[in-house]
Image (cartoon, rainbow, N blue to C red):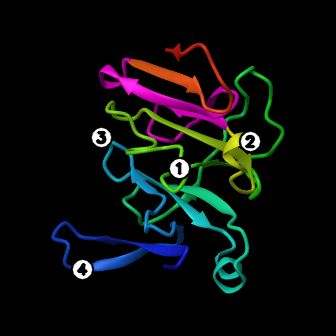
Amino acid sequence: QSPVGTVFVSKSTGTFFVESLKDTNRNELGFVDYETVYGIEGVGLANVVANAMDVEGRGSPKQLRTVITFDDGSSWTPLRPPSTDSDGKRIGCNPSEEDCSLHLHSVTTPHNFGRVFSSPAPGLVMGVGSIGSSLRDYADSDTFFSTDGGVHWKMVLRNAYKYEFGDSGCIIVAVNDEEPVDEVQYS
């Protein structure tokens, strides 16, 4: 029933586990914000609770940060944000600073069902999130896309969008998830 958990990894036989990532975000149903990137070995995304002690001890609101692994959980790093927004304007933060990284909503956010980030095309990853020191509310988020398994990100749409990959990534359909709409966008 803890709002914070730990990710463990094992060797291929599943007989020996080691701690990979502490303070992972989980909800009351036991869902954990962790997902491997489809078709790319060793790449995974997770949300950690930056203020885990305050959340568990005092019931403080969670401050979530997204991290990525490229080596099957041996090391984790923040997501590097894009340098420009969807209109091509510079994003006003320095990615080398701790308070400037990309954070994505995951399975504990009720807007998403099934695989949240990955498409059936290896390397294509999409998510709704925000840039800063921690993840902002869903309504204050934008939509981001990566074509190289999460190494580089691009803001593709202002606002939070529901999206779906079709034909193994040949088409992406998106619809605004923040306001009533009468159109669907595709790429």
Counting from the top left corner in percent of width and height, residue 132 is at 75, 50
Q: Is 143 in the magenta?
A: yes
Find disc 4 in the rendering and name its residue: 16
Counting from the top left corner in percent of width and height, residue 165 is at 40, 26
Find disc 3 in the rendering and name its residue: 39
Q: Which of marks 2 and 4 is in front?
A: 2
Q: What residue type is labelled 2?
A: Asp
Find disc 2 in the rendering and name its residue: 140
Label 4 secondary element? loop
- Near mark 1 (Cα within 10 A), the count class, few <14, some 14-19 or many ≥20, is few
Judge left or right: residue 178 versus residue 110: right
Q: Relative to the observer, which residue lies in front, 170 or 80?
A: 170
Label 1 secondary element? loop
- Near mark 3 (Cα within 10 A), the count class, few <14, some 14-19 or many ≥20, is some
Counting from the top left corner in percent of width and height, residue 84 is at 73, 29
Find disc 1 in the rendering and name its residue: 110
